[in-house]
Structure formats: C-alpha cells, structure tokens
Image (cartoon, helix red, strand yellow):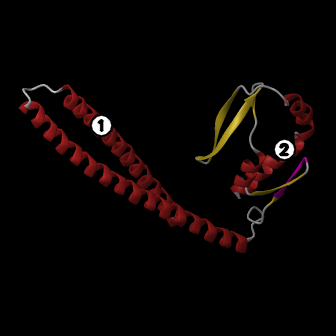
Amino acid sequence: MKKFIAGLIVGVLIFACGTVFADSIKSLVGSKVDGAFEVYYQGKNLGEAPAINNSTYLPVRKITEVVGMQVKVEGKRIYLNQSDISQGNSSTTKDDGKKAKSQIELEISQLMGDIDRYNREISVNQSSIQRHEEDIKKYQEQISKASGKDPVLEQVVENIKKMIQEENSTNKEYEAKITFAQAEIERLKKIIAE
C-alpha cells in the first residue's frame, strides 16, 4: 500500500507538473551543475541528484522502480505504469518475494566470500610480517657485529619496517571491511527473517 501511495504521488507530481517543467528543462540544457545531493529512500541510497539553479533533479528510473512503477522509454518520451506489485497482484508479489530472498541470499554469499578472501589476505600479510621481523633481527645482529654502524643495512631495516607498517595498515583495512560485511550479513538476515 505504501508503494502504491508513493507511486501515485510520484505519478501525480510528474504528470501534473510536466508542462510547467518542460520549459524550465529546456532552459537547463547546458547549465552548470551546482552540486549533488545523496538521495535515500527508506534508508537505501538511490544515488546522487544533481543540483542545477537551486533545484535538485532525481533520476526517473530509480525513483519509479523504488515506488514499484515500470519505466518504458521510447525516443524522447518516458512512460510510467503501475507494476503488478503496486496493483496488488499476489502471485507476482510472491514470485518477487522469492526473487528478493534469493537476491539477498546471493548478497550474503558474496559477502561471506569477501570475508574469506579478506581473512586469507590477513593471514598472508601476517606471515609476511613475521618473515620481515625475522629479517630485521638478522640485519640488526649484523649491524651490531659490524661495530654498530652499517648505513646500507640500517636503510634496509628501515625499508622493512615501512613494509611492516603498510602490511599492518592493510590488515586494519581488511578487518574494517570484515566488520562491515558481518554487519551487512546480519542486516540482510533480518530482512529475510521478516
């Protein structure tokens, strides 16, 4: 019902204001974009809406799909129609529900694959860090045996320390991505449960 009402509002706004906006849109061709705004519908990011002459312009296809309308483009005309879901077709709603569930399950599967990949990368980096730390110990022993100064080996040690810092930084990024993916999986599981 919410989609129907939202679709109805969008439809009325688009059709009622079409003639008023026609002249203003023609005058916008070649205008400078002043900025862009992120557009959200029920918490879902739909993308950006450009701001031109103190007005924002939403992408028709994204908005209409969100409210359950079908979009058809023929030449320079856009046709908007209520989809079966908006009209309350229960069999289509069930089919779309199954499609939505399978899509969410696919997203969960992809996120789990990402988590596995990030964990493997972290493991590889940890092994590399351990090897680098062992190399540093060897080089530091060589430096101390060579009367405490060897500029070449000291530079090698500094370079290895930088590599360790980069690998640790990369691991932190992977850990943050894992945390985000886990939270997203939980969110998607709640959607399926509803």
55 shown above or below 132: above
Q: Is residue 78 magenta?
A: yes
Number of numbered discs on residues? 2
x and y percentages locating residue 164 in the rendered image: 28, 39
Q: Which residues are magenta?
A: 76-81
Instruction: Name the dominant secondary structure of the magenta segment.
Output: strand
In the visual, does 12 lie left or right of 126?
right
Q: Which residue is mark 1?
A: 165
- Pointers 1 and 2 in contact (C-beta within 8 Å): no
Q: CA distance from mark 1 to mark 2?
A: 55 Å
Q: Which residue is mark 2?
A: 14
Closer to the camera, 62 or 131?
A: 131
Circle 1: residue type: Gln
Residue at 10% x, 36% y is: 141
Q: Secondary structure at mark 2?
A: helix
Circle 2: residue type: Ile
Crowding near the residue tagged with mark 1, few <14, some 14–19, many ≥20 C-alpha atoms within 10 Å: few
Residue 36: which quarter of the image?
top right
Quadrant housing the N terminus: bottom right
178 shown above or below 116: above
x and y percentages locating residue 62 in the rendered image: 72, 49
